[in-house]
Amino acid sequence: MSIMSIDNRLWSAKAKTLSPYVPGEQPKHDNLVKLNTNENPYPPSPKAVMAMQAVLSDEARMLRLYPEPESDELCQALAGYYGLKPEEVFVGNGSDEVLALVFACFFTKERPLLMPDISYSFYPVYADTFGVTTHSIPLKDDFSIGVEDYHKPCDGVILANPNAPTGRLLPIEDIKKLIAMHPDAVVVIDEAYIDYADDVKEASAIRLIRQFDNLVITQTFSKSRALAGLRVGMAFANPNLIAALTAMKNSFNSYPLDRIAQAGAKASVEDVTYFEDKRTQVIKLRKALTQDLQALGFTVLPSAANFVFATLAAHDAADISDRLRQEGVIVRHFKQPRIKDYLRISVGTQAQNERLIEVLTHILSVDN
């Protein structure tokens, strides 16, 4: 139903003014090369699948009972994996829910929230939903984040690292500077794609949470762990901040993760060998895709994610996107003025990437 045709007389004033997030398209057609929503080209851990199947078979009788409200076993598994304490871990129904709780807990204050002008487009939606004043900080001309530009009074900072949709990674030393710059504000680093950094242990800011009591790290099982359909996200922070998230969660949705999600996510964390193998494979595919696009004349930003952000001089990105779609290849095009000449292309399987390059080669040969 079109939003223009909805009778909203009974809506609240807030509901009438919301501008909802628009997710990437999920086409219902078969045989498409779908490179528009940054999903993992590989399936999830077989051990995760088995754990979920067990809940639906041998333990099906347990589905009549509510799940464990704090997902204790999953939090313990995550704590063990990252070398943390369980009280430094929080999980929720996808990182989007975790981020919503972060906004509600830490950003509904007097001073503005600072964020990049080009980043995850859900951040402004959350800000509008929770009445958070924001101040957008422009990325530099090369689409990198200039930490010095964030030296402004605020009650919070949020940025994605690697950034989306650019894929650029902010070095850990710059993150330290940013956090130290705002000791009385919560700094949130959204690491949805961090596992695709070449050196993830060096790139991730999780190891800083005991050094800085104002730091929150969010991550997700949707990307590197190939569980986008399961909806599991997490946050890492000192216990005081985790306690706030828990209190907010229990005032909104006290059982966020069902038994199937808890079992599958826990098994995924424990299957380290599979995770590392598939993470490494995606990085190799990203590098090969970058080289292939560059060979066609594209300029590709340095990416530490499972996607690339690319532009082709003297060509209209929207037109390229439309022509790819006509050939059954879907990529993401954004209409914002600063990035309208770019395409965000998810890393697919080798066969999917080869099909993309094949179609692009044909498109460019016709144009020439």
Image (cartoon, rainbow, N blue to C red):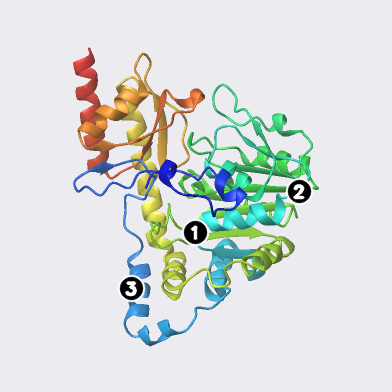
| Residue 99 horizontal/vertical position (percent) | 58, 53
- The answer to which of marks 1 and 2 sits earlier in the sequence is 1
Q: Amino acid at mark 3?
A: Met
For the residues marked 1 and 2, what is the alpha-carbon distance in whole angstroms?
25 Å
Give the camera-side residue of 297 and 100. 100
- Residue contact at pointers 1 and 2, CB within 8 angstroms: no
Kindly state the secondary structure of the residue where label 1 is placed. Answer: helix
Q: Nearer the viewer, mark 3 or mark 2?
A: 2
Residue 303's tag is none
| Residue 88 horizontal/vertical position (percent) | 66, 64
Q: Is residue 194 left or right of residue 312?
A: right
| Residue 156 horizontal/vertical position (percent) | 72, 45
Residue hosting label 3:
50
Kindly state the secondary structure of the residue where label 3 is placed. Answer: helix
Q: Amino acid at mark 1?
A: Gly
Kindly state the secondary structure of the residue where label 2 is placed. Answer: loop
Residue hosting label 1:
94
- Rendered position, 290 above or below 28: above
| Residue 317 horizontal/vertical position (percent) | 36, 24
Circle 1 crowding by C-alpha within 10 Å: few under 14, some 14–19, many from 20: many
Q: Quadrant of residue 144?
A: top right
Circle 2 crowding by C-alpha within 10 Å: few under 14, some 14–19, many from 20: some
- Residue contact at pointers 3 and 2, CB within 8 angstroms: no
Q: What residue do we see at 34% from left, 69% from top?
A: 49
- Rendered position, 354 above or below 72: above
For the residues marked 3 and 2, what is the alpha-carbon distance in whole angstroms?
45 Å
Q: What residue do we see at 44% from left, 48% from top?
A: 6
Residue hosting label 2:
109
